[in-house]
Image: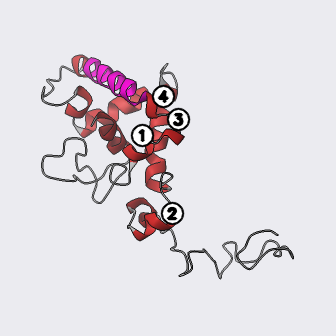
Amino acid sequence: MVIEAYADTIIPGERRFDGDRACLGAAPGAGAVAAGALELLAWSAGGLAHQLETMAFLLNMHAGEYAAEHNLVLADDVPPFVALDFTHRTALVRRLTDPEHPEKQLWIGLALFSNMAYDSAAHLNTTDALAAGHPGLLAIGYAAPDADGLWRFPRFSYGRQLAPIHPNTTPTGSPA
């Protein structure tokens, strides 16, 4: 829940259900959590999975310190970071990712993975993610593949062909 709340602070989205405490509904539509931030972070290939418990512990420690500094009374039925409202979560994340903060690399890494879940669905097969309606890929206008599962672009993105197709390129687009 703590890691989800952090991801929701990076790319906020609507609440997933009544009483959702991780996603506060700070923005309409689906955010990083709905896009699979926790799944990406827990994926062993990402390299952060083994640190998530420690990160949650540290984030709650910082949230408790932040709350004490600002005389905030936090609900005790959820972890401290989750108990912060969106404005305070954002302020704390800003502090943790400040260039002068000694742990900035940890918190920036967590923010980057939250972004990756939303804008690239790095933990999913792109075709499957699009078919399932991945919110981030759809929001950025990621084009669906052709019926055969391959992406072809009939117009050049720069308005002109930049280089000719290599003569040994196969019909599937692979080099020979």
In the picture, measured across the screen, residue 127 lies left or right of residue 92, that is right
Q: Is residue 161 visible?
A: yes
* Residue drawn at (50%, 35%) of the image: 109
Q: Residue at x 49, y 19 (%)?
A: 102
Q: Residue at x 33, y 49 (%)?
A: 33
| Amino acid type assigned to the residue bearing label 4 in the image | Leu
Going by the numbered disc 3, the residue's amino acid type is Gly
Amino acid carrying label 2: it is: Thr
x%, y% of residue 136? 42, 59
Q: Between label 2 and label 4, give the one nearer the viewer.
A: 2
First-in-chain label (3 vs 1): 1
Q: Which residue is mark 1?
A: 42
Q: Earlier in the sequence, mark 2 or mark 4?
A: 4
Query: Magenta residues?
Result: 51-66
Measure how far apart labels 3 and 1 are at the Cα level.
9 Å
Q: Could you say where residue 15 lies in the image, as x and y percent from the top left?
A: 21, 52
Do the residues under discs 1 and 2 have CB atoms within 8 angstroms? no
Based on the displayed image, in which of its 4 quarters is residue 79 positioned?
Answer: top left
Measured as percent of width and height from the top left, residue 90 is found at: 33, 36
In the image, residue 141 sits, relative to residue 103, either above or below, namely below
